[in-house]
Image: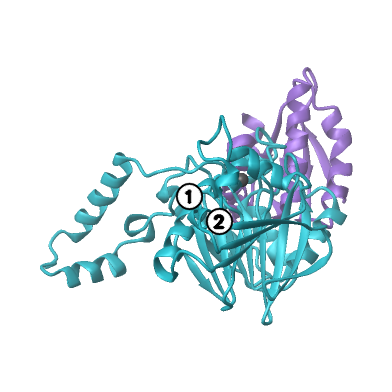
Chain colours: A purple, B cyan
Amino acid sequence: MDLAHTRIAGTTVLSPAGRIDHATAEAFKAALAPHVARCAAGQDRLVLDFGAVEYISSAGLRVLMLAAKQAKVQGGILAVAALQPIVREIFEISRFTLVLNVFATLDEALAA
Amino acid sequence: MVVRFWGTRGSIPVAMTTAQVQRKLVAALTRAAGRVLDTPQKVREFVERDLGFAVSHTFGGNSSCVQIDAGGSEYTLCDLGSGARVFGNDLQAARGPSGHTFHVLMSHPHWDHVMGFPFFMPAYTEGNRIVIYGCHPALSEAFRRQNAAPFFPVEYARMTATIEFVQLEPERDYEINGARVRAKLQRHGGDSYGYRIEQNGKVVVYSTDSEHKQDDPAEVMGFVEFFRNADLVIFDSQYSLADAISIKEDWGHSSNIVGVELCQLARARRLCLYHHEPIFDDERIAALLDETRRLEEITRADHRVEVSAAWDGLEIVL
Ligand SMILES: [Zn+2]
Ligand SMILES: [Zn+2]
């Protein structure tokens, strides 16, 4: 999976796109891994800009959960921002909004 | 084929509290304000038509027991949780105490799935025959131990029905009470087994106490095949997905999200949420059902899955 990334004032912003489902979750995990490894105390914060993500399955959510857990252990901060309405609903129904840092917009995530 | 739910609660039986009963009464009477409900008939119609499920019904509190009724003279059950007590009493009241044969498919011998058996009155009646099928080698031992001191006052030997245990192997087809039955190993502490039951062109899958990690495509596809084109999938949805893969990881249960995904991939016709979380009240389970229906709708491609939530007393006609 192509994971476009930019750096904005001490934050690395990753921008996955399309569907994160059973077919693409492994590739998403692999693309995310080096960034999560660097998401630690004293390092860049990591924000996943989900503006171009159309769907996420349980396998994709699992990748996010593992990434967030790893970041936490390392003392880093990982957030997800700008969910499309459908993806936002999937986050709510799966209760991921209760366990991940979720922001309405990328600006809010950067300002937090 | 009729699927009848006698016990649908997960982990431990629960009873409605006074506070919950009063909440229903307040909601119903508030709704009735200003209406002329001066006969029992009018009240009944109002209850049935104008009150939502969570006010007019309860999901119930008995633990796992489901009857698969394909119309034969013998009975097929999945699990013997506390719902089996109600089934046994109903049956003996309606059809007499003796002369019955029961075929029971056991998912696993955890407490909530066997605890109805000491209270299953047909077992204490001569002339009944109970055949208990399962893949666990120590299944009969589990039943004998719970009907013995110090757990229970009446010894297993006092059960005068004929009780037989039949060891099944997973991934093999068996003919049981006229149905083709296949068991599948599931991820659960001490193992559990799901059952695919096919009869008269209808397919029911009973899959409870099953954790799905969804990180191994081969394992996912194994369940998709097991659920393939089923008319009904009865699915353990006790936890939210977030809980199932964080604080409750390895506790052995699944979520509504995974149920919808697997049924979509398998092109199953109906998904029935089952093994409800004991701390959830009726409003909470009803809300979970609404959310699950919404999830099915927003993630649907070209195949619709009809979603329901099991309750003690529900009958689904296939
Ligand atoms: Zn259970
Ligand atoms: Zn169990």
Residue A88 on image: x %, y %: 60, 50
The x, y position of residue B69, in whole percent, is 57, 72
Query: Which SS class for mark 1?
Result: loop
Chain bearing tag 1 is B
Q: Which residue is mark 1?
A: B62
Kindly identify which numbered label has been placed on residue B179: none
Residue at horizontal 80%, vertical 27%? Answer: A39
Amino acid on which the number 1 mark rests in the picture: Asn
Q: At x 87% / y 51%, what residue is drawn? A: A1
Do discs 2 and 1 share a chain? Answer: yes
Q: Are marks 2 and 1 in contact (CB under 8 Å)?
A: yes
Q: Measure the C-alpha gap from mark 2 to mark 1.
A: 8 Å
- In the foreground, B104 or B225: B104
Which residue is painted at 70% across and 42% down in the image? Answer: B141
Q: Chain of mark 2?
A: B
Q: Residues within 10 Å of mark 2 (few under 14, many from 20)?
A: many
Residue drawn where x is 47% and y is 64% of the image = B314
In terms of secondary structure, where does tag 2 sit? Answer: strand
* Residue A46 visible in the picture: yes
Residue behind label 2 places its C-beta within 8 angstroms of ligand 1:
no
* Residue B96 or residue B198, whichever sits in front: B96
Q: Quadrant of residue B200?
A: bottom right
Quarter, ligand 1? top right
Q: Where B128 sits versus B146, above or below?
A: below
Residue A93 in percent (x, y) is at 57, 50
Quarter of the image where the C terminus of chain B is located: bottom right
Q: Looking at the figure, which quarter contains the N terminus of chain B? A: bottom right
Left or right, A53 with respect to B86, comes to right
Residue B230 in percent (x, y) is at 69, 71
Q: Which residue is mark 2?
A: B65
